[in-house]
Amino acid sequence: MKRTEKHDEKKNSIGKKIIYFLGTILLLTTMFGGYIFSDKYFASEPKTGKEEFGEKVVITLPNGKKVYTYENLVVKEDGKLLYKGERNTIDLSGGVVVYEEWKD
């Protein structure tokens, strides 16, 4: 075997090692990044829907429209009837509250 053949063989083994090393780093980075992404952007505990909102009510507004909601989300403050949801508050003043079963 000539020296050039040995050198070429040694050169190929170094190239393979570099490719394996880079592939391993890429795989580990993808796995670690996927873990961080899933942990940050996806809920860790699913909502079970066990929250109690009280009885179902229908509020008929003066203009004839109806609002279907739960008793615990309707509050009276300063003489006003308000719907207080998770993200917003709606003024339902002048509406008539009727306790009525409605379909989800």
Image (cartoon, helix red, strand yellow):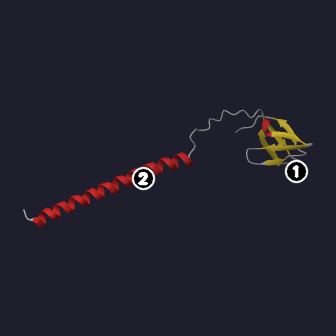
Q: Position of residue 4 (x, y in %)?
A: 12, 67
Q: Is residue 79 above or below residue 26?
A: above
Relative side of 97 to 54, left or right: right
Label pair 1/2, CB-CB below 8 angstroms: no
Q: Is residue 88 above or below residue 8?
A: above
The residue where tag 2 is placed is 29
Q: Residue at x 37, y 53 (%)?
A: 25
Kindly report the distance in space between the C-alpha atoms of the residues bearing marks 1 and 2.
Answer: 59 Å
Q: Is residue 87 above or below residue 97?
A: below
Q: Residue at x 62, y 38 (%)?
A: 47
Q: Residue at x 40, y 50 (%)?
A: 28
Q: SS of the residue at dot 1?
A: loop
Q: Residue at x 77, y 40 (%)?
A: 69
Rendered image quadrant of residue 3: bottom left
Q: 10 Å neighbourhood of mark 1: few (<14), some, or many (≥20)?
A: few
Relative side of 54 to 80, left or right: left
Judging depth in this view, the residue of 19 and 84 nearest the camera is 19
Rendered image quadrant of residue 45: top right
Name which residue type carries label 1.
Asn
Residue lying farthest to the bottom in this orientation: 4
Name the mark nearer the viewer: 1 or 2: 2
Quadrant of the snapshot with the C terminus: top right
Name which residue type carries label 2.
Thr
Q: 10 Å neighbourhood of mark 2: few (<14), some, or many (≥20)?
A: few
Judging depth in this view, the residue of 70 and 77 nearest the camera is 77
Pointer 1 or 2: first along the chain = 2
The residue where tag 1 is placed is 63
Judging depth in this view, the residue of 45 and 21 nearest the camera is 21
Quadrant of the snapshot with the N terminus: bottom left
